[in-house]
Image (cartoon, helix red, strand yellow):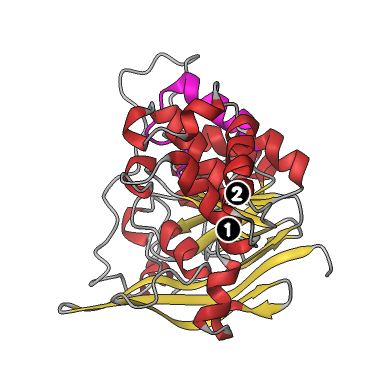
């Protein structure tokens, strides 16, 4: 399809440590269309950030390695690109907003110099034109007095302004795909709302496709068209955002949604998902979520379920769909249960 900007097929990325192989991403597949937003959610350690770093091949030269799969960007497999070509793609065709701008920005360079660098490397602008374009980008992302801020260093700016600088760097070359890895985690609620509004506006103006990696399901509801829920390196549910919130199918997805505070309810304690994410060195033989799942049966503990069609609008990695071992009265209505 011409509208498909990125297609990831059976991506597998591992870290090789003294304690053994850690399968951080283990068979992930998804695609994103032009101008659309895909949200990737899940607990810490589920493989969200490693998936994004694998797409840009930023793990090359580390203990992490992509050991299988394909990553097609505009029809070409990024995993087969030589290092020099990947350097031309990063920051130009595909950009990334990292989690913490204070550690991602270079403290020894002014904000203007860091934005201008993208223009000089990818657009081959002169130093003067690159600086002028950097100031324009600061203005575009809503930073007041952009000429002044361009001459300042990251530590002289607030957290919200630093994040805007990161967005300016990422969007400087009008990339076709933007990956935002927890872009609002360190910001207060007011600044977070401003950053999300800014990203939506710029995405609409530039027609950029967006991968939004986040823990915040509120951000997912506001920003995303489709959602991939990850757990232990695998996608356990993949659907459009409306279906995810109105009728979640995987027990893990239901647990995540139930853990969101509801101001209309007067509970003394919040709902939680019991247990914890298993160690990557000692994953369960069957479904990774089975030890924490209230509906798990023997089949769940003995074999890993496939990511299969639950119906026409989603993919779910769960044995409940396609088998007759479950009593429908014990399941939530969204999973096909009977009240």
Would you place residue 72 above or below residue 199 in this image? below
For the point 56% across and 42% down, which residue is it?
168
Confirm or deny contact between disc 1 and disc 2 (CB under 8 A). Answer: yes
For the point 84% across and 68% down, which residue is it?
2
Look at the image and give the residue range highlighted in magenta.
181-199
Q: Is residue 262 visible?
A: no
Quadrant of the rendering where the C terminus is positioned: top right
Which of the 4 quarters of the picture holds residue 8? bottom right
Q: Which one is in front, 161 or 30?
A: 161
Would you place residue 186 above or below residue 171 in this image? above
In this picture, residue 261 sits left or right of residue 169: left
Mark 1 to mark 2 CA distance (whole Å): 6 Å
Q: Position of residue 29 (x, y in %)?
A: 59, 70
For the point 45% across and 44% down, which residue is it?
182
Which of the 4 quarters of the picture holds residue 63? bottom left
In this picture, residue 173 sits left or right of residue 75: left
Q: Position of residue 5 (x, y in %)?
A: 72, 64
Outermost residue toward the right in this view: 2
Quadrant of the rendering where the N terminus is positioned: bottom right
Mark 2 lies on residue:
130
Mark 1 lies on residue:
120
Q: Is residue 264 visible?
A: yes
Outermost residue toward the left in this view: 18
């Amino acid at each position: 399809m011409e509208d498909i900007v990125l297609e990831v097929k059976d991506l597998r990325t591992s870290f090789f440590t003294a304690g053994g192989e850690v399968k951080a991403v283990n068979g992930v597949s998804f695609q994103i269309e032009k101008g659309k937003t895909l949200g990737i959610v899940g607990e810490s350690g589920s493989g969200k950030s490693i998936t994004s770093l694998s797409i840009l091949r930023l793990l090359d030269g580390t203990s992490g390695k992509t050991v299988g799969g394909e990553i097609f960007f505009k029809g070409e497999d990024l995993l087969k690109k030589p290092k020099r070509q990947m350097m031309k793609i990063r920051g130009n065709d595909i950009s990334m907003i990292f989690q913490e701008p204070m550690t991602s920005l270079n403290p020894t360079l002014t904000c203007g110099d860091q934005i201008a660098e993208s223009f000089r490397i990818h657009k081959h602008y002169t130093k003067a034109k690159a600086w002028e374009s950097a100031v324009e980008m600061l203005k575009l992302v809503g930073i007041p007095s952009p000429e002044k801020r361009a001459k300042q260093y990251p530590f002289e700016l607030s957290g919200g302004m630093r994040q805007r600088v990161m967005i300016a760097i990422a969007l400087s070359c009008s990339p076709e795909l933007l990956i935002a890895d927890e872009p609002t985690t360190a910001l207060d609620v007011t600044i977070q709302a401003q950053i999300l509004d800014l990203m939506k506006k710029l995405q609409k103006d530039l027609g950029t496709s967006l991968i939004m990696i986040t823990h915040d399901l509120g951000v997912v509801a506001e920003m995303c068209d489709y959602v991939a829920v990850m757990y232990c390196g695998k996608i356990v549910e993949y659907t459009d955002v409306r279906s995810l919130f109105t009728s979640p199918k995987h027990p893990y997805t239901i647990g995540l949604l139930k853990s969101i505070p509801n101001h209309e309810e007067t509970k003394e304690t919040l709902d939680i998902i019991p247990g914890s994410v298993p160690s990557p060195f000692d994953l369960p033989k069957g479904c990774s979520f089975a030890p924490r799942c209230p509906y798990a049966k023997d089949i769940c503990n003995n074999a890993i379920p496939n990511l299969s069609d639950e119906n026409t609008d989603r993919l779910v990695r769960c044995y409940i769909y396609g088998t007759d071992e479950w009593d429908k009265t014990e399941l939530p209505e969204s999973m096909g249960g009977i009240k």
